[in-house]
Image (spheres, rainbow, N blue to C red):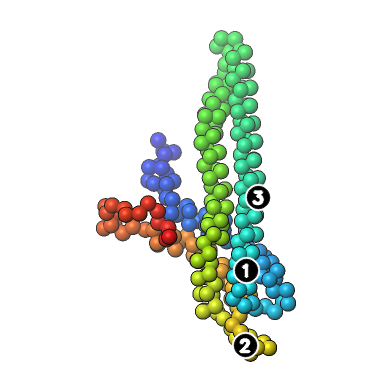
Amino acid sequence: MGSTSSSEDGGSANLILRLGTSIQEALRPSRQQITQAWEEEDAERSGHLSRPRVQRVVTRLLEAQLEAASAAASRAKLQVAKEQANMEKAGRRERAEMRSLPPGGATQEHLDRCTALMLGCAAGPVMAGMMAGYVDVPVTCLTAMLQDKELLQLRVEALFKMHAVEVPDSAGAESKLRLEDFQRSYLGYFDRAASLLNDACTVPRNEESLPSTASTCCLQ
């Protein structure tokens, strides 16, 4: 059947591609979110922050994103549940109407509509589960980022290594990071997430037949 071509060629089962795209689109913070998290730490509006304060900005930003993602996931799941309940109600109503007709009284329209609703009610829970899993991707990813203190610390250290500027203070000078450098570098990861994940997880053809020695591709 022509409608199955996307499944047959593997296009619908590309986990890495779909996951990378989801990370890129759903986890990328807005510039407004970054600025808000930064300004909550930079009360003096100096435009640059020390290493510990930048670390707190990253945590604050991820926490704000996680809160927003969790709220969005809850709304989406509630909407899916309502749609599923309405579909099941319509299916029962349509089936009862068809059964009330005299023998041979069901039209093609009755049968087609009843069949569509029967299929929808049968597969609805499966699709609902897929959709629930999809909206949970940002929540899961942001939670993982918050919990991985090692990577967060190393990212801040890398930011300072690449972009730190010496800012004079009463004690002499201190290495600090500017908002624009933080914003550009932080967003840069999410802009490249899909290609990074794909490159890291693509298995060379000569290694495809080798047995796997790990159950996940995560670095522990």
Return the residue at label 3. Answer: 71
Say which amino acid is labelled 2.
Ala
Which is nearer the N-term, disc 1 or disc 2? 1
Q: Secondary structure beneath disc 1?
A: helix
The mark found on residue 56 in the picture is 1
Return the residue at label 2. Answer: 173
Say which amino acid is labelled 3.
Ala
Q: Quadrant of the C terminus?
A: bottom left
Circle 3 Cα neighbour tier, 10 Å, few/some/many (<14 / 14–19 / ≥20): few
Locate residue 76 relative to residue 204 in the image: left or right.
right
Locate residue 206 relative to residue 186 in the image: left or right.
left
Which is nearer the N-term, disc 1 or disc 3? 1
In this view of the protein, which residue sits in the foreground, 107 or 23? 23
**Residue reaching furthest front?**
171
Image coords of residue 188 (percent x, y)? 53, 68
Q: Quadrant of the N terminus?
A: top left
Image coords of residue 82 (percent x, y)? 65, 36
In this view of the protein, which residue sits in the foreground, 130 or 220? 220
23 w.r.t. 9: above or below: below
